[in-house]
Image (cartoon, grey):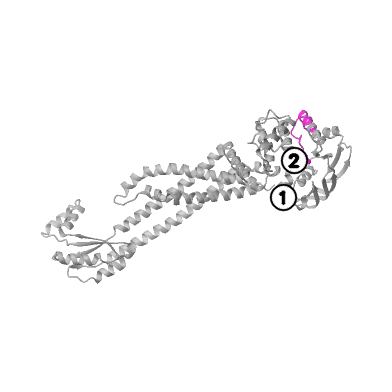
Amino acid sequence: MFLSLIRVIKFSLQDIYRNIWLSLVTVTILILALFSVNMLLAVEAISRAAIDSVKEKIDINLYLKSEANDEEILAVKSKVSNLEEVKEVRYISKEEAMEKFNEKHKNDPDMLEALKELNDNPLTPTLVIRAKDIDQYGSLIAKINAIDSPAIESRNFNDHKTILKRIDAITTKVSEAGAIISLIFVLITAFLVYNSIRVAIYIHRREIGIMRLVGASNSFIKMPYLVSSAIYTLAGLLAVIAIFFPFLGLLQPYLEAFFIDYNIDIISYFSNNFLKIFGLQFLALAAVNAIASLIAVSKYSKV
Amino acid sequence: MIKLLNVSKIYQPDIKALNQVTLHIKPGEFVSIVGQSGTGKTTVIKALIGEERVSSGKVIIGGWDVTRIKPADVPFLRRQIGVIFQDFKLLPKKSLEENIAFALQVCGQAPKKIKTIVPHVMKIVGLEDKMRRCPNEVSGGEQQRAAIARALVHRPKILLADEPTGNLDSINTKDIIDLLLKINKFGTTVVLVTHNREVVNRLKRRVITLDRGCLISDQECGKYIL
């Protein structure tokens, strides 16, 4: 048993070495396939992170009366903070609101001029409320509407509901489309890898026939090719890891520049899920390669 | 030792490669099966090693009923018969030594024993100084000798030779035939399939003649009659 195993591994390594160009071509195809799959994963991770960041930035503004005193404002803030759906409540005073307005419209002289016409600060203090989850905004709005306080100026959230619905619909469609595209892509990649291995074994078809005529059993013929396909898989995966992480390192600054204020760290994503991502890829690719090897060798050993 | 009993082989739709052939070859014999191209000579060899299933009749070789053999048992049958082919059928990426050793490795022989047997067999066929060469680095005659060494290495009682000199010149042909005669002297049954008139006439051994799939002649000290 042990002798057979040694022989199988020896034949496999001999075959890889003595057909080195074929081996390199096969591994290159695996590298390209794996690189594409990992790029797809990266795009998915980035879009998911961007969507989550957008969702996180959605908030509700609860406008308070200008004449409300600190005690009343604090009371409202406290009631809102205690709601289970609320992640964060921030108070923006009239003065702070004015500063933000001027900053936002600094390149719009007409808007600034219009504001100057009004002598008083027309802006009201605001409570900026952020929910823990975008799906909880519905119940949060209902609970805010139920809060009874003389400090609250207005509580019309209809626009919010519409916007939230639209964002939710778009993000759901983006996720679904992403999943379908990923599945198609993965299937194409699996098919490509399957055929690459079959072609590699097709080139050995005469040798497989000779081995069979000399008295080799099916398992004696198949095992070295299975071992070779596992070695190709491992070599391809290691090469992709060696290429992909530096590539992510080059990509990260561009992501940070493009998605300012969004916390997108693609390197951490791949590092934190390293075993899951690359482990699954190894298993899936090894399975595809093994199936391709077995089918091809069976076909050519019918002598 | 070898029996074909009313064996027919029909390739679809209606090509009769063998037609009710009956023959019996005793242990230790040297038999030539002759005929022109397409008369069914190679089909006999293929039927004997289980490469082709006959359409009717019985094929028995070395105690194996090949007509009833399970696919999983075919490798075990082939390990007990030595076969050499016109196109040598050596593994191109292995050296001559590795090609010969392969026949022992498939039987599960220990590496130490292989290291003893292979050089000895290569010496018998005159290839002791070409062990590390690959098939494409030696001549046709040397390749055929390596193929013979591979066929003999597990000491089969039967050696089937399918047109072994088909791709060789006259000098190499003589060497190969002399080698086969030498093997036969040691007790191995040799079945030589050939269409080479000079070889058959020189041998003065039993000659079975096939014509259009039928056995037309079986002579103890025969000649090429077609």
Q: Are marks 1 and 2 on the same chain?
A: yes
Is residue B54 visible in this depiction of the protein? no
Q: Nearer the viewer, residue A210 or B113?
A: B113
Q: State whether residue B73 is above or below residue A19.
A: below
Give the mark, 1 or 2, whose residue is nearer the N terminus. 1
In the displayed orientation, state which residue is furthest to the left.
Answer: A119
Please state if A176 lies on the left or on the right of A232 as rendered: left
Instruction: Give the residue type that dot 2 points to.
Output: Val
Could you give the CA–CA distance between mark 1 and mark 2, rounded to whole angstroms?
Answer: 17 Å
The residues colored magenta run B155-177
Amino acid on which disc 1 is placed: Asp
Q: Residues within 10 Å of mark 2 (few under 14, many from 20)?
A: many
Magenta-drawn stretch contains B167: yes
Q: Which residue is mark 2?
A: B83
Residue B213: horizontal and vertical position, in percent? 82, 46
Name the subunit of mark 1: B
Residue carrying label 1: B73
Position above or below: A117 against A248: below
